[in-house]
Amino acid sequence: MSISTLLFGRRLANREAEGRKIGAFEGVPAMGLDGLGSASYGPEAMLAVLAVVGAAGLGVVQPVTWAIVLLLAIVFFSYRQTIAAYPASGGSYTVARENLGLNTGLVAAAALMVDYMLNVAVGISAGVGALTSALPALHAYTLPLCLGILAIITVVNLRGTKESGLALALPTYLFIGSLFFILGYGVWRSWSGHAEPVVPPPGAAAGEATEAVTLWLIVRAFAAGCTAMTGVEAVSNGVSAFREPTVKHAHRTLTAIVVVLGTLLLGIAHLAQGYGILAMNQEQDGYQSVVSQVVGAVWGRDWLYYVTIGSVLAVLCLSANTSFVGFPRVCRQVAEDGYLPRAFALPGRRLVYTAGILFLAVGAGALLAVFGGITDRLIPLFAVGAFLSFTLSQAGMAQHWRRSAGGRADRTRLGVNGLGALATGLALIVILAAKFTEGAWLTVVVIPLTFILLRAVRRYYSSIESHILPEGLREVRLVEHQPPVFLVPLMRWDRLASRAVHAAVRLSPDVVALHLENLNGPDAGAEEGGLREEWRRQVELPARRAGVPVPRLIVEASPYRSLLAPTLRTMEALRGEKRGRPVVVVLSEFVGGRWWEVLMHTHRTKRLRRQLLRHGGPDLAVLILPWQLEAPETEEVLTEEEPVAAG
């Protein structure tokens, strides 16, 4: 078994695609971890903003949270309609492109791509923050832990969406069950009068009030808390991942995510106010997340505390999985339209979009490295892309219903999506105003740059298509054609050279061999005399006996040890001599069977092939003759691709 098979599993056939799709049970872990995990860092971000007013800020925690949950409900009903109207993946890009125009769709795609990448970084950093809350000794290893978790999630997703959903099911449902129990028990204690305010731990961010509660402060707290809503759009972007009936499974998944998320937000806000829990600075030793403080205040620090915090850690770290499901699918749609490299549209060995997964992993890893894996540094960049895509998607759906000729039902749908566009648009303005100077300006710059990059990719493909599409294509000339001239570069006379010359003679009567002197430097011994004798004996005499045209040998000096320049000069001379006939260069290339053999050879032939294809002109062809010391392992490759039953 190869290392790739061990890590990623066997290669899947196209007909197995339907068996790889998921239902609602796997859909919640696969697409909902971003939304569920944000219940941890969303309230904490809100409390961090309110820290400047001390304990007085706790009085506005619940009203602000109710406003966020109301906005979440509006988005929920809007996206239910989007899923029903676009069952083949109705993400923001598709909806905006079809209803608001191509450029608007590209803006939505750019916003989604940026948001997904930030989600990976924020989710993992928040998860590691939960880990260091329970085990403070690990605080110094925050960044290595973040990068290690990112690598694990990447490998899991390269194995397939179904595997990632099943692998994440246990921590997801443990997270929901344990937090629901803790929050329910805490709310009961609060209502029965048993809740006592906790003593703020050392390093709490809130202490003495330095500001008063103002409308602007409440607006900023709302903007920070809205980070809890990111990830809700992932279901509409990934509808194609669900098995039939897709709309039914997508609706169930979206409903479960939103109901659980809304309940968690309200429960954490109620207990934070009831127990007087304040946000802490994540960069300080002894840091305790808000969820860690809530669980400790309600239950204490026994086994259930560590089970709950462990599930929170797992869900936060694995919340990046939502992006690993959504991001490659958005990239596939954009690439199919020619605005991303075409590799993003091709499924890999496990029927997932490998290029998108790897690109997301590299980008998120760079963000974690730049910002040190600290959630508070990443949060200000967050939510702008999500709410921009929310707004464009809902505006596109409103336009969709406005154009339709339906009756009262369509007018109701228009009202729902119109309200969603208005609400998320206003929230976007609030978020931009509140977080612009804190770092959101970077997202505002990156999204337009991404849009420009997408347009540049399309221009590149358009320029290629203008040259190769059939318009103006001439008919194939089937008369008065002559065979090409075959040019065989020779390093020395050996089996590889003999095989190359033999193949060339069988294909054309005009064969020229080219040997370059001094190719190995001034200290190398001269081989011209020996080569000429071998050529006369091994090639010229047999050709005359067989009555076939005799191949020529040309010897050229290469004073700068270059393969390309003398070869190109010889090709130009042959073109002039043979009146423009095409030239085929025959190269023998050693193919090693072991990884370490790459280190044992100069790879001159590979470099020459690349350079010839770039500089040799349109009438050049390069023929590669592979040379292997051992028989190729064809049977192993065929075995890997044998049809197997979908499971």
Image (cartoon, grey):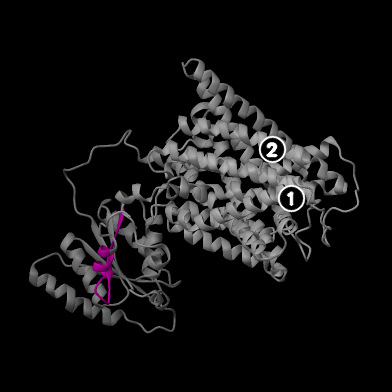
Number of on-image labels: 2
Mark 2 or mark 1, which is nearer the start of the sequence? 2
Image point 46% across, 55% down: which residue? Answer: 166
Relative to 644, is 319 on the left or the right? right
Disc 1 or disc 2, which is closer to the eye?
Answer: 1
Relative to 401, is 388 on the left or the right? right
Image point 20% across, 61% down: which residue? Answer: 510
**Residue range corresponding to the magenta coloring:** 619-639
Residue receiving disc 2: 68
**For residue 68, above or below residue 158:** above
Residue lying at the far front of the rendered structure: 192
In the image, is residue 626 part of the stretch drawn in magenta?
yes
**For residue 124, above or below residue 59:** below
The image quadrant where one finds the C terminus is bottom left
* Mark 1 residue element: helix
Estimate how packed mark 2 is, as few (under 14), some (14 to 19) or many (20 or more) residues with alpha carbons within 10 Å.
many
**For residue 588, above or below residue 614:** below
Q: Nearer the viewer, residue 445 or 136?
A: 136
Type of the residue with mark 1 = Arg
Tell me where residue 304 appears, x and y as whole percent: 64, 62
Type of the residue with mark 2 = Ile
In the image, is residue 461 part of the stretch drawn in magenta?
no
**For residue 170, above or below residue 428:** below
* Mark 2 residue element: helix
Tell me where residue 429 appears, x and y as whole percent: 71, 34
Residue receiving disc 1: 189
